[in-house]
Amino acid sequence: MAFNFADTQSLMDITSRPELVFVKGEGSWLEDHNGKRYLDVIQGWAVNCLGHNPKPIVEALNKQSHLLINPSPAFYNLPSIELAKRLTGASVFDRVFFANSGAEANEGAIKLARKWGQKKRNGAYKIITMDHAFHGRTLATMSASGKEGWDKKFPPQVDGFPKAILNDLDSVRALIDDQTVAVMLEPVQGEAGVIPATKEFMQGLQELTREKGILFIVDEVQSGYGRCGELFAYQHYGVTPDIMTLGKGIGGGVPLSALLAREEVAVFDHGDQGGTYNGNPLMTAVGVAVFDTLMAPGFMDSVKARAAQLSAGLLKLSDKYGMKGERGLGLLRALLLDGDYGNELVAAARDAVPEGLLLNAPRPNLLRFMPALNITSEEVDLLLARLDDLIAKVRK
Ligand code: PMP
């Protein structure tokens, strides 16, 4: 298919993009405008948990689009009720609010914690978040994030997000005062380079937040929904948070996210939270299909098996080339390079012929892997073999 890249000039220039356009996808594979195929182990940044265009999603979209696309968030609809029932049934939470993006779910979590602070903690509003955290690109979620340089981008920041150090409980304890209402973190920091919280830290946070009578919030937008080998990442840690946010995988590629809270924390008054597309049945019908696929017998076992295979393969590569190991939880993993050549690897992998490989380097010294949860064993082997060739070529 011929494509004129001058046409891209009408799009707002917000990031540097390579000169290729994807036109088709299936499972772990994408096809560009020239018919070249790419093995995709990024999957829209961990979004397409069932790969590209999976049958359950295509069928759910098709079926729901013939029934009802958008009644109005002012009325109940069946898919939203179904999905909320499934999510509360499978988790420690009692109430769900559906939104459209991870940032919007986190914005809701921040508002809910502040509301709870107004009602139960004399107006306490500060939410302790972590250095290097990523919670989204709205103004409040950017302020909650600990990404380097973000505090200078759109001043003034939203007030009330003191930063602690991940896996350092004393750094959290030192920040708690009578204005503190919650601690919020990603169980695995994704954008920071796949840095898991330790079990000791998560359990310590649970004890500390209970002791101080404040809320424990987990942002599972990237680490939730089967990504870390359990349906929810907090389950891996054996903790029971008060609020959780979900995004990315929950919609398997369509704009769907969720804010979940325990009953005693779900204190919004009418009018506090909402939005035109909240609980849109086209999206929540997809959510039901994704949930049921993840919960089918054997699905999570196979996620664990692929995660073990990928982890062992990455470690082998690290040993072969004298790199700094690999880390992660489930199918959210990183290979720690022995130099700052991650971006060269990404470009060489993408441009490889006859087939490309889509990689991601959130930092120049590491590669992040977030393949489809149903990637096959053969595709993991292919990824590792192609990675081996690329490293040999690029690493000098
Ligand atoms: N939280 C986390 C942990 C994320 O990784 C991301 C996206 N990378 C977000 C929030 C924001 O999600 P969205 O881009 O859907 O707003």
Image (cartoon, rainbow, N blue to C red):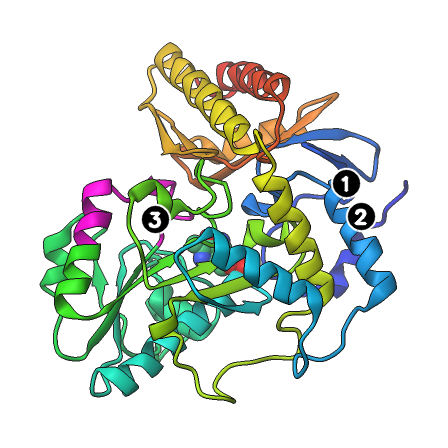
Q: Which residue is mark 2?
A: 59
Picture mark count: 3
Label located before the other in sequence (3 or 2): 2
Residue at image point 60% right, 66% down: 100
Q: Secondary structure at mark 1?
A: helix
Image vertical order of residue 212 relative to residue 34, above or below: below
Q: Is residue 195 magenta?
A: yes
Query: In which image quadrant can residue 29 be found?
Result: top right
Camera sees residue 163:
yes
Could you tell me if the residues under marks 1 and 2 are in contact, i.e. CB atoms within 8 Å?
Answer: yes
* Residue furthest to the top: 320
**Boundaries of the magenta span:** 186-205
Q: Position of residue 145 (x, y in %)?
A: 36, 62
Label 1: how many Cα within 10 Å (few below 14, some 14–19, many 20+): some
The mark lying in front, picked from 3 and 2, is: 2
Task: Left or right? Give the position of 256 relative to 369.
Answer: right
Residue type pointed to by label 2 = Glu
The mark lying in front, picked from 3 and 1, is: 1
State the separation of the CA atoms marked 1 and 2.
Answer: 6 Å
Residue type pointed to by label 1 = Lys
Q: Position of residue 374 (x, y in %)?
A: 61, 31
